[in-house]
Every structure is written in structure tokens, then in C-alpha cells.
């Protein structure tokens, strides 16, 4: 099936690291994405990783990709209250590049 | 960077009204745009693929006559929810692939979404 799976909730304390996990479905997906959605807003592209990479780091964000297990993770270092949002992972399918999204992980950051 | 502008951001209207939502790519051309719908606490679901100069491609279960899509130029796609009813209330989001001729493997750029509330 075409289900991208991720846990629904994650709660961390400010300053801790957050790790959001995702399992995708298509081993031929060439790009995998992480989006952030703040309440009432559209999706903001956080980062993406090409399938021939196993890690990508961008400031506080680290993406790890395990192609064998079709597992993707997003690590946010030094999590801040402003990081509270819903995080969606997505894989790209089809010749026109439409995205298949997970249901989103709601990250709550406590002071 | 590339920006997608979506308008309006919030619409409240009576049942039976038709509502048009615009999606514009501001500094790049988009031959393809996507329309998504998001129900509360759920992920985005692709409704249709809008193709400039040709008919839109609808996902299974999406009524073509209900959700009219027009992609008349390389920078504008519109979604019209015809004769809207309360069950059409939702968050609608458009997206366009980044610059480049091919839509494949390009990061998507999203509009801010339109919250549609039908009374």
C-alpha cells in the first residue's frame, strides 16, 4: 500500500533533542521530505534528502535515511518552543512528482 | 526563493455558494500544480493535479464537477468548489514543484492554504 507511517505525538523539554521517525513505502523514492506545519498555516519545507545519501545536516536539523529498512528520521537539536508544530514526512511518487504524506507527528515542546 | 501565493486564506460562506481559490507561482513558472485537502488532524490528501493548458487529473473519489480546476497560465491555477456544502469545509492547499522543466524530484513549494467554512 501507499502508507507513510509516523508516530502521532512527541513531547520533549526545551533544550532537549527531538527525534521524529518515519517509515516510507517505496524503495524507489528518490527524494524524501520533511515538512513543518504550524497551526492554521501551510506546509513549510524543512529539508529533504536524496536517496543516495544516508545523512544530511542543516544547522539544528539532522536527517538520517536507512534505505534498507525504508526508515527516515528527523533530529532537532536544542529543541525550542518555536519548534512546536506538526511534522510531516513525505515521499515523492509518480512521474509528475506528487507527494505521499504521513499523518504527521505533533511535537510539543515544554518549557 | 520561489514562492507560491494562495488566496483567499479564509472563506466563510453559505451553503450553495461557489468558492474560487487561486494559487499563483510568484517568481517561477509552474506547468503543474497540485491541490490538496486536509481534514482536521489528518494528513494532506491529493485531490488533483492541475496541468497548464490541459485538463486536470483527478484522484479517485474526487468529483470533477464539484471541484473545478483551471490552469490557464503558467503562474495561475484555480480551484472552484461549486455549490459548496458543509461537508466541503476543509483546509485546501496548493503546491507547485520548484523551478525546472520536470516536476519530478523537485522540492514542492506550498501555498499557505485556504480554510473553507460552509455554514
Image (spheres, rainbow, N blue to C red):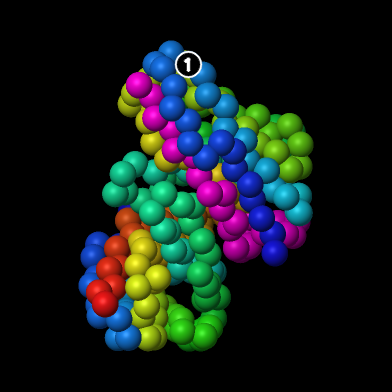
* Residue B116 occupies quadrant: top left
**Is residue B77 covered in magenta?**
no
* Residue B94 occupies quadrant: top right
Indicate the position of residue B72 as horizontal and vertical percent values.
Answer: 73, 32
**Is residue B100 covered in magenta?**
yes
Indicate the position of residue B82 as horizontal and vertical percent values.
Answer: 50, 19
In this view, the residue in front, B53 or B12, is B12
- The main secondary structure of the magenta stretch is loop
Say which residue appears at 46% left-offset and 64% top-offset: A35
- Tell me the quadrant of the picture where the C terminus of chain B can be found: top left
Indicate the position of residue A99 as horizontal and vertical percent values.
Answer: 49, 55
* First to last magenta residue range: B97-119
Looking at the rendered structure, the secondary structure element under dot 1 is loop
**Residue occupied by mark 1:** B17
In this view, the residue in front, B39 or A91, is B39
Quick one: which residue is furthest to the top in this view? B16
Count of number-bearing discs: 1
Question: What is the crowding at mark 1: few (fewer than 14 residues within 10 Å), some, or many (at least 20)?
Answer: some
- Tell me the quadrant of the picture where the N terminus of chain B can be found: bottom right
Say which residue appears at 48% left-offset and 36% top-offset: B10
Quick one: which residue is furthest to the front in this view? A111
* Residue A67 occupies quadrant: bottom left
Say which residue appears at 46% left-offset and 81% top-offset: A61
Amino acid at each position: 500500500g501507499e502508507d507513510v507511517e509516523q508516530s502521532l505525538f512527541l513531547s520533549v523539554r526545551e533544550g532537549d533533542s527531538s527525534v521524529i521517525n518515519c517509515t516510507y513505502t517505496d524503495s524507489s523514492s528518490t527524494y524524501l521530505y520533511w515538512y513543518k506545519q504550524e497551526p492554521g498555516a501551510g506546509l513549510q519545507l524543512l529539508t529533504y534528502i536524496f536517496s543516495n545519501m544516508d545523512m544530511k545536516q542543516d544547522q539544528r536539523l539532522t536527517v538520517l535515511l536507512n534505505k534498507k529498512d525504508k526508515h527516515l528520521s528527523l533530529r532537532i537539536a536544542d529543541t525550542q518552543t518555536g519548534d512546536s508544530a506538526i511534522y510531516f514526512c513525505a515521499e515523492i511518487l509518480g512521474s509528475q512528482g506528487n507527494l505521499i504524506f504521513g499523518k504527521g507527528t505533533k511535537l510539543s515542546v515544554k518549557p | 526563493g520561489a514562492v507560491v501565493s494562495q488566496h483567499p486564506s479564509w472563506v466563510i460562506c453559505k451553503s450553495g455558494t461557489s468558492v474560487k481559490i487561486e494559487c499563483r507561482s510568484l517568481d517561477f513558472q509552474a506547468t503543474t500544480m497540485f491541490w490538496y485537502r486536509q481534514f482536521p488532524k489528518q494528513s494532506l490528501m491529493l485531490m488533483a493535479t492541475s496541468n497548464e493548458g490541459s485538463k486536470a487529473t483527478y484522484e479517485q473519489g474526487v468529483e470533477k464537477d464539484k471541484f473545478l480546476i483551471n490552469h490557464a497560465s503558467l503562474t495561475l491555477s484555480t480551484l472552484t468548489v461549486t455549490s459548496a456544502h458543509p461537508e466541503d469545509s476543509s483546509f485546501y492547499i496548493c503546491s507547485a514543484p520548484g523551478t525546472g522543466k520536470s516536476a519530478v524530484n523537485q522540492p514542492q513549494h506550498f501555498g499557505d492554504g485556504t480554510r473553507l467554512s460552509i455554514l
